[in-house]
Image (spheres, rainbow, N blue to C red):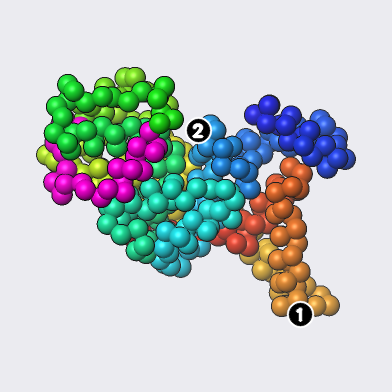
Amino acid sequence: YLSDAVTQLLEHKQEYTQFGVIRYFAEYFSSVKNSNHVLFREYNYIRATPHNRASFIRVFWRCYRQIGKSGDLLSMLEYRSLLQLLCPDFPVEMVQSAARIVLMDDAVDCLMSFSDFLYAFQLQFFYQEFLDSVLVIYQDLLTGKSPNTVIVPTSTSIEQLPSVAAEENNKGGQQQDGVESSTLAQCIDALCDRFKHSHPSRSCMKEVLEQTDRVCYYSFLMSLAKHEIIHQTVGALPSRAELLIDLEMDQELDKLISQISVSPGSNSSGSAVGGLKEVQRKASPRRNIHHRRKMEVESDGSTEETDSSEN
């Protein structure tokens, strides 16, 4: 974070030095603490640390919670557009992977509820490297390899895994009955022993796999995505029962609406346009950190009041 703070300072020196370097660093690390620092940042930055990933998941939830409250169903491409409003270079492959978890790899052009997509996205985005490794193991087991001959991927070769995972996903040749749950559990346990990236709780994965004799890859991931231990571990989202509740954001929205409706000397539509322009002005990714914090509070109140509907 210190390296990124210095880099940002040097790239936008004229903007940030206007209110002092000390204040700039204070604002930067305050935004990191408050999880506001990932807004409008590049993809490599938002996935650089577990904290950044959890922060982005929370920002996504807060920004679009209203979609869940209204019960709207969206397509994979629409969710991609929403994500790219927060991170312009967010890759479509990540969105496709999350959609496959929800839709069990059937048809990624089907509509999804916000809650289903959100939980699947949390699992896929936060544990991407681990899930890529599990997919490689799963595909080996599908081909009939015994657990002793399955090559357990390690984090040292993780850079090669996404392309392998994408290739296997595109084949769409998974058997309907999947693989033996006990065998997959054995291989996953061996993977956890050697894996250096974040991975879901072993007890959580074991509990899911013990519920059935055979399991398919995407049904396993969907069960994990809905598991309460996953939400508690990542720490980005509230419980499923509270997913539609965000009192702080609701209060900010009420304030904004009241300001627009009682604004003297202007009609409501003109005030709304002016308010929107003000939010957009402060939402610029090239504004300083001080302005970004203000912007996120306002944006939370105007466009980000979204929660998810439960299936």
- Closer to the camera in the image, 95 or 248: 95
- Closer to the camera in the image, 171 or 42: 171
Mark 1 vs 2, N-terminal side: 2
Which residue is denoted by mark 1 in the rendering? 267
Q: Quadrant of the C terminus?
A: bottom left
On residue 50, the disc is 2
Q: Residue at x 44, y 30 (%)?
A: 159
Magenta segment's dominant SS is: helix
Q: Is residue 76 left or right of 149 when viewed as pictured?
A: right
Q: Secondary structure beneath disc 2?
A: helix
Is residue 149 at all visible to an observer of this figure?
yes
Is residue 211 at all visible to an observer of this figure?
no
Residue closest to the far left: 213
Query: Residue 55: where, in percent of width, then height?
Result: 54, 41
Q: Secondary structure beneath disc 1?
A: loop
In the figure, 150 relative to 33: above or below?
above
Numbered range of the magenta stretch: 161-184
